[in-house]
Image (spheres, helix red, strand yellow):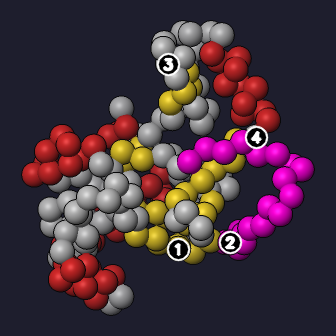
Amino acid sequence: AWLGRSCHFRFLCFNTTSHRYTIYQSKQEKTLRRFLDKHALMRVSSTMTYSQADGSIRHPTVSLGGLNLKWGNKGMARLEWFPDVQEYHASQNGFQYYELPSSVVLVPFHSMNAANPGHLVWDDFFSIYNLLHMFDLTDYELLLMRYVLQDNERGLWASCDFTDEKKKNCKHMMEK
């Protein structure tokens, strides 16, 4: 399901210490999840988490970018993603954040092969545009943030992190 799912997060945060994306679960969201856990046949797509039969908590994951069939199932699975979920407590001391202007939408994405202008336009930018259109966000200013896989493995074949040369070429094309 994660291969065909798209999400529009409100209050998506980027933790500058861990370099990971985070969303904060509100009290209402947690209450909704507990209610849904008691009703096994009920599914709501807007909930951040859901319980599995074994009692573990899962997230409705998405893909962070276009998929290349040459990566195989194992390679493609590396793009399955969901931000870290933390419970929000209004009384948290020292909780500091920078908020983007309301006219800006942050778009994290993994580039399939931005060194190639055709792949950059059709696989990256066109997909991002379709998502913006689907969620009615085309009038917003974009803040694109290229996502680097966090699994400490070499980048996927032909992706921007496959080699240092590829990373340099991707950066060059994205700055044009």
Q: Position of residue 78 (x, y in %)?
A: 30, 48
Of pointers 3 and 1, the one earlier in the residue sequence: 3
> In the structure shown, which secondary structural element does the residue marked by tag 3 occupy?
loop
Nearer the observer: mark 2 or 4; the answer is 4
Residue 136 visible in the current orientation: no
134 horizontally vs 29: left or right: left
Of badges 3 and 1, the one in the foreground is: 3
Q: Which mark is residue 143?
A: 1
Return the residue at label 4: 26
Foreground mark, 4 or 1? Answer: 4
Q: Which residue is mark 3?
A: 52
| Amino acid on which disc 1 is placed | Leu
Disc 2 residue type (three-letter): Leu
Q: Earlier in the sequence, mark 3 or mark 4?
A: 4
Q: Is residue 143 above or below residue 71?
A: below
- Asked if residue 101 is among those painted magenta in the image, a careful observer would answer yes
Q: Mark 2 vs mark 1: which is more N-terminal?
A: 2
As shown in the figure, which amino acid type bears the numbered disc 4?
A: Ser
Query: Marks 2 and 3: in contact by CB < 8 Å?
Result: no
Main SS of residues in magenta: loop
Report the magenta residues as a range.
Answer: 84-103
Quarter occupied by the C terminus: bottom left
- Residue at x 62%, y 9% (from the top left corner): 39
Name the N-terminal-most of marks 3 and 2.
3
Does dot 4 land on a helix, a strand or a loop?
Answer: loop
What amino acid does circle 3 point to?
A: Gln
Q: Quadrant of residue 174?
A: bottom left
Residue 43 lies, in percent from the top left, at 55, 20
Q: Is residue 4 magenta?
A: no
